[in-house]
C-alpha cells in the first residue's frame, strides 16, 4: 500500500499538504485509519477513554518510533511510518485495556520486530500485529478482549462492524478471502456442534467471538503484504486460516486462536512466495562476463 513519504531534502510546501493528505486518505492505509477510527470512537466511549487510551497510545507510539529509523535506513529517506501506526493501533484495540501500558508497548515492539525478521524480498511474511499479540500472550501473560470490535455494544453497532470490515475487504479486493474464512470458520463450528458437544463451540456464535471473527476477517486476514492478491490463492488462504484457527480453538482454547491460525496461513503464503521467487531465479538465465547467471543473483 502507498506510504505517505516526505524526504528531508524536498519536503512538500505548505500549500501541497492538503493535497498529500487527501491522497493519503484515499489510499488503503488512509481508509484503514478512518475505518479503525469509526470503530475506536464508540468502543472507547463505551469502555472508557481514560481506561483505553494509555495502552492504545503506548502501542501506537512504540510501533512508530521503532519502525521510523528502520524505514530511514532501508529507503534512505524519512517517512511517516503509517503502517506501524496501524499495527500499534490493532495491538491496542485487541489487548485488554486492563493490561499495563508497558505491556501494550512491549506487544507493539514485538510486532514491529516480527515485521522485519521474516521477509520474502521486501515483504514481511508474518502479520505484525498477530505475531506480536501471540508472543505477548506467552511472554507477558497479556489478556485480549478485542474491545475495538464492539463486543459489548448493541446490534446497530454490529452492523457498523460488518459494514466497515466488508468495505475494507472490498476496497482491498479480498472479499474471496474473507468469505472463505468466515464460511469455513462457522461451518466447522456448526459441524462440531452437531457431531460433538455443542457447549464446546457455542461461544463461537456469541459475543465476543462473533465480533472477533468479523473484525479479524475484515481488518487482519486481509493485510496486503501477508495475504495473496489472486482470488484462487485467497480461497485457499482463507480455508487454511480457518482450519488452523479452529484446530487451535479445539486443542488449546486460547484467546489467540484466530491470530495463531492467521500466522499459519502467513507461513503458507510465505512458502508460496518463496517458491515463486526461486522459480524465477531458475527460469530467467542471463549471461555476464562469460558465465551463466540468473537474473536475480549469481
Image: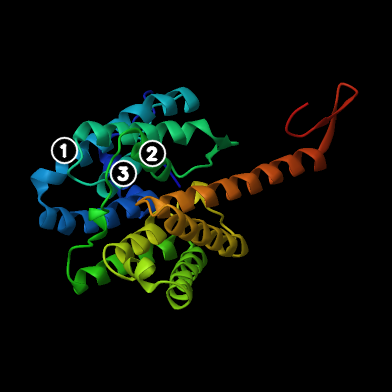
Question: Is residue 12 visible to us here?
Answer: no
Q: Give the mark count.
A: 3
Q: Position of residue 197 (x, y in %)?
A: 41, 71
Q: Quarter of the image holding residue 147?
A: bottom left
User: Is 240 in front, or is 223?
Assistant: 240
Q: Residues within 10 Å of mark 1 (few under 14, many from 20)?
A: some
Q: Position of residue 269 (x, y in %)?
A: 59, 50
- Who comes first in sequence, dot 3 or dot 1? 1
Q: Residues within 10 Å of mark 2 (few under 14, many from 20)?
A: many
Q: Secondary structure at mark 2?
A: helix
Q: Residue at x 22, y 61 (%)?
A: 150
Q: Which residue is mark 2?
A: 132
Q: Residue at x 23, y 62 (%)?
A: 151
Above or below, 156 against 220 in this view is: below
Above or below, 78 against 243 in this view is: above
Q: Position of residue 177 (x, y in %)?
A: 51, 63
Taking the view exactly as shown, the residue that stands out farthest to the bottom is 194
Confirm or deny contact between disc 2 and disc 3 (CB under 8 A).
yes
User: Is 7 in front, or is 241?
Assistant: 241
Q: CA distance from mark 2 to mark 3?
A: 8 Å
Q: Which residue is mark 3?
A: 91
What numbered label is drawn on residue 54? 1
Q: Position of residue 207 (x, y in %)?
A: 26, 66
Q: Residue at x 33, y 44 (%)?
A: 86
Q: CA distance from mark 1 to mark 2?
A: 18 Å
Q: Secondary structure at mark 1?
A: helix
Question: Is residue 219 visible to us here?
Answer: yes
Above or below, 92 against 209 in this view is: above
Q: Secondary structure at mark 3?
A: helix
Q: Quarter of the image holding residue 104?
A: top left
Amino acid at each position: 500500500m502507498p506510504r505517505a513519504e516526505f524526504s528531508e531534502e524536498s519536503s512538500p510546501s505548505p500549500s501541497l499538504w492538503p493535497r498529500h493528505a487527501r491522497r493519503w486518505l484515499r489510499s488503503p492505509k488512509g481508509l484503514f485509519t478512518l475505518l479503525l477510527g469509526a470503530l475506536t470512537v464508540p468502543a472507547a466511549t463505551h469502555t472508557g477513554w481514560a481506561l483505553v487510551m494509555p495502552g492504545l497510545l503506548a502501542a501506537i507510539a512504540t510501533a512508530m518510533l521503532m519502525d521510523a529509523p528502520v524505514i530511514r535506513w532501508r529507503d534512505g529517506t524519512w517517512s511517516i511510518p503509517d503502517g506501524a501506526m496501524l499495527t500499534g493501533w490493532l495491538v491496542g484495540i485487541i489487548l485488554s485495556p486492563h493490561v499495563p501500558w508497558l505491556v501494550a508497548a512491549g506487544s507493539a515492539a514485538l510486532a514491529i520486530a516480527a515485521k522485519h525478521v521474516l521477509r520474502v524480498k521486501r515483504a514481511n511474511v508474518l502479520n505484525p500485529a498477530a505475531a506480536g499479540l501471540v508472543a505477548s500472550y506467552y511472554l507477558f501473560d497479556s489478556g485480549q478482549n478485542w474491545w475495538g470490535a464492539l463486543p459489548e455494544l448493541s446490534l446497530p453497532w454490529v452492523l457498523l462492524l460488518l459494514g466497515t470490515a466488508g468495505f475494507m475487504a472490498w476496497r482491498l479486493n479480498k472479499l474471496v478471502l474473507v468469505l472463505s474464512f468466515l464460511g469455513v470458520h462457522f461451518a466447522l463450528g456448526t459441524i462440531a456442534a452437531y457431531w460433538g458437544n455443542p457447549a464446546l463451540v457455542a461461544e463461537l456464535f456469541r459475543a465476543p467471538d462473533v465480533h472477533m471473527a468479523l473484525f479479524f476477517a475484515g481488518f487482519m486476514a486481509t493485510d496486503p503484504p501477508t495475504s495473496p492478491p489472486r482470488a484462487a490463492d485467497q480461497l485457499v488462504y482463507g480455508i487454511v486460516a480457518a482450519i488452523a484457527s479452529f484446530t487451535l480453538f479445539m486443542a488449546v482454547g486460547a484467546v489467540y486462536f484466530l491470530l495463531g491460525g492467521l500466522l499459519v496461513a502467513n507461513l503458507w503464503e510465505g512458502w508460496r512466495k518463496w517458491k515463486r521467487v526461486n522459480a524465477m531465479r531458475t527460469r530467467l538465465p542471463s549471461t555476464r562476463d562469460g558465465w551463466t547467471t540468473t537474473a536475480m543473483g549469481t
